[in-house]
Image (spheres, rainbow, N blue to C red):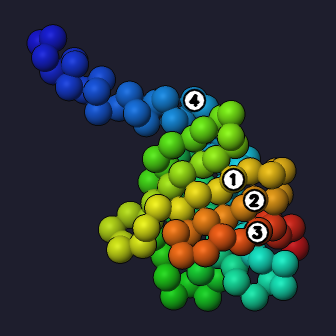
């Protein structure tokens, strides 16, 4: 019985540790765009699920939170079942981040809901 508890704890502990460090809805949820609002994507955080989608809806994927470095203010995440590399948000403020998708780094702004 102890072995089952150890396996169960080792599987869920990384999720628990990441989940306790920051509020996903507060830091990720919303539409993120560059200053010109040309390059945008949505992150939808709802009921424990985190979804990445393009505004046109032609691309949609789940998001796996890998790490949150509280000291540096960096959230590291990957899109599930895609060939895209690791993405990072370096939190500058609640509505401004430095986004690095492994190809380029840009400043993104959370768009206000209309």
Q: Mark 4 points at which residue?
A: 20
Locate residue 48, reporting x and y percent: 52, 46
Is 42 placed above or below 97 here? below
For residue 100, say whether it is visible.
Answer: yes
SS class, disc 2: strand
Mark pair 1, 2: CA separation: 5 Å
Residue at x 55%, y 69% (from the top left corner) = 101
Count residues near mark 3 (Cα–Cα under 10 Å), then give few for <14, some for 14-19, many for 20+: many
Drawn side of residue 31 relative to residue 69, left or right:
right
Q: Are marks 1 and 2 in contact (CB under 8 Å)?
A: yes
For the image shown, how many numbered marks are present on the structure? 4
> Which label lies toward us, 4 or 2?
2
Locate residue 95, reporting x and y percent: 83, 57
Judging depth in this view, the residue of 86 and 29 nearest the camera is 86
State the quadrant of the C terminus.
bottom right
Mark pair 1, 3: CA separation: 10 Å
Drawn side of residue 76 relative to residue 38, left or right:
left
Mark pair 1, 4: CA separation: 18 Å
SS class, disc 1: strand
Q: Which quarter of the figure has residue 5?
A: top left
Locate residue 92, reporting x and y percent: 80, 52
Which mark sits nearer the N-terminus, 3 or 4?
4
For residue 49, say whether it is visible.
Answer: no
Drawn side of residue 9 relative to residue 32, left or right:
left
Drawn side of residue 61 relative to residue 41, left or right:
left
Residue at x 38%, y 28% (from the top left corner) = 13
Count residues near mark 1 (Cα–Cα under 10 Å), then give few for <14, some for 14-19, many for 20+: some
Mark pair 4, 2: CA separation: 21 Å
Q: Do the residues labelled 2 and 3 touch (CB within 8 Å)?
A: yes
Q: Name the residue under label 2.
A: 97
């Amino acid at each position: 019985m102890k072995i089952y508890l150890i396996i169960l704890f080792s599987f869920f502990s990384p999720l628990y540790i990441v989940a306790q460090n920051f509020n996903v809805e507060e830091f990720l949820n919303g539409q993120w765009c560059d200053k010109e609002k040309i390059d945008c994507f949505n992150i939808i955080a709802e009921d424990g699920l985190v979804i990445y989608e393009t505004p046109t809806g032609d691309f949609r994927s789940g998001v796996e939170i890998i790490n949150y470095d509280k000291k540096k203010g960096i959230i590291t995440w990957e899109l599930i079942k895609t060939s895209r590399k690791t993405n990072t948000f370096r939190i500058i403020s609640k509505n401004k981040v430095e986004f690095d998708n492994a190809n380029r780094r840009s400043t993104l702004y959370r768009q206000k809901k209309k």
